[in-house]
Image (cartoon, grey):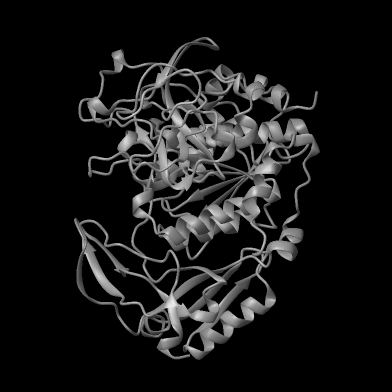
Amino acid sequence: MSQTEKVNLPNSRRDAYPGARRVGPADPSEIIDVTVYVARRSKAMRLFPHIEDLGKTPIAERRYLTREEFAAMHGAAREDIARIREFAVASGLSVKSEDAGRRAIVLTGTVSAFAQAFEADLGRYEFPPSGAFRGRTGELQVPSELASIIEGVFGLDNRPQAKTHFRIRGEGAQAAAPEAAAAAFTPVQVASIYDFPSGVNGSGECIGILELGGGYNASDLTSFFGGLGLATPSVVAVSVDGGANTPVGDPNSADAEVALDIEVAGAIAQGAKIAVYFAPNTDQGFLDALTTAIHDTTNKPSVISISWGGPESTWTNQAMTAMDSACQDAAMLGVSICVASGDNGATDGVTDGQDHVDFPSSSPSVIGCGGTLLEAAGNKITEEDVWNDSSSGGGATGGGVSEFFALPSWQQSAKVPAAPNGFVGRGVPDVAGDADPDSGYEIVVDGQQEVVGGTSAVAPLWAGLIALMNQKLGKPVGYLNPLLYGATVEATFHDITSGNNDGYSAGAGWDPCTGLGSPDGAKLLSALSPP
């Protein structure tokens, strides 16, 4: 195939990494793996309208596909995979693996061969203080006859993609004195305050957790759950793209993210199996971990918790499209996905003077999870406001309006404001929960007891709640967003009306700080149950 037969791959444009400088070409002889995502065999049918209809259907009446059924109906077509394989061989590349259900084909070969195959100028980049990556800018090219079946190419650029969304109590530059701080809680106490369903423990469910760094120690889990008088849940580590459970021994590292996610979800849904998918922190690793978890026929998670993300402006359009597409797959399978909305307020940490939202929480196919400051006496909430410690350097809940994903039908009545660029976009978050480190969660990480908050805690909190509801209802609740915004279900939330995230203010009903509010688990379950 000659170069004249190639066209730009839609949405593949990569911008320069802020603060990085090119120091030379990438090693042409380095062997790398690249994941090519292929369109569904049902590409003539847009899934999202069907998914929105599914989301409005009462849970008792839903019919989900098995993973095997999905692969047969909506996976990659055999002939499309064959065409990618033919292109790879002609380009001096080889096929390492194929997965029709995930619609993923992993190619392997030299940097030089990949650069020529996709017309990519791959370079070596460095950024302070000691970071380095293989990167590219501009668009990729593919043969014109493949442009309609290739949805994305990932792995040529392996820059860091996402950040954790946890905050350790007292890490702010001017953090409040301990005596001035609100009380910290165990995850069990938070679940009790939010009146999570009783009589169930998540037995028979699997909670998937995505991690892009760090790891957990079995001794920490034994210490944590034993301290609560609970049995340690079944936890399995799943390697994706060479990622592994590798704790670094520093409680301030991603180890705290991993421990927080496992310990919050596991303490709430004590009988659920927990599968932790470890992958490299790249867009390829993130997407491959997500699709692996969704289509995992061994562990079969019914809910997935994600506490990593980054501003929409740092993602390629192909990555956001592919990840949202994968989350649509999850909806068809009855898998719920809970995602932290970020810890840097309305700007999401971007310094251009504009407000930004965090992805993947901005995907309309996931439950975006914002954060609150929770105060309680016994099991009763005495006050709950928007989490915002930004004045002391301690962070604030993310939230705002997407500049990429359009306003979904189920948010039409939520009075979502226009995005900063005027786009009529999807509002973030959908729901909230305790996230302020001052009212944070007591966990054990790297042998130390810490109090940790951030919206990272809210995603596994909601994942645990969903596992309990799945068990109680006898089937997965799946894609919840359209039901959450219905008047009956919305009325079950604790509406947060006080506070702001330095860009948006809380108010009656949905708002871009805490969404619909924090849960009353028992009332939510009742509203979702058959009459």
Residue 305 x, y percent position in the rendering: 54, 43
For image coordinates 34% across by 45% down, the residue present is 253
Residue 40 x, y percent position in the rendering: 64, 65
> Can you say which quadrant of the picture contains the C terminus?
top right
Residue 283 position by quadrant: bottom left
Q: Give the answer, above or below, for where 162 lies relative to 77.
A: above
For image coordinates 23% across by 43% down, the residue present is 351
Which of the two residues, 109 or 516, is positioned nearer the viewer here?
Answer: 516
Left or right? Give the position of 430 relative to 125.
Answer: right
Residue 409 x, y percent position in the rendering: 58, 38
Look at the image and tell me whether residue 279 can be seen. no
Look at the image and tell me whether residue 96 can be seen. yes
Residue 365 position by quadrant: top right
Q: Give the answer, above or below, for where 99 lies relative to 83.
A: above
Q: Give the answer, above or below, for where 284 lies relative to 124.
A: above
Which of the two residues, 330 or 127, is positioned nearer the viewer here?
Answer: 330
Left or right? Give the position of 355 relative to 341.
Answer: left
Q: Give the answer, above or below, for where 247 lies relative to 79.
A: above
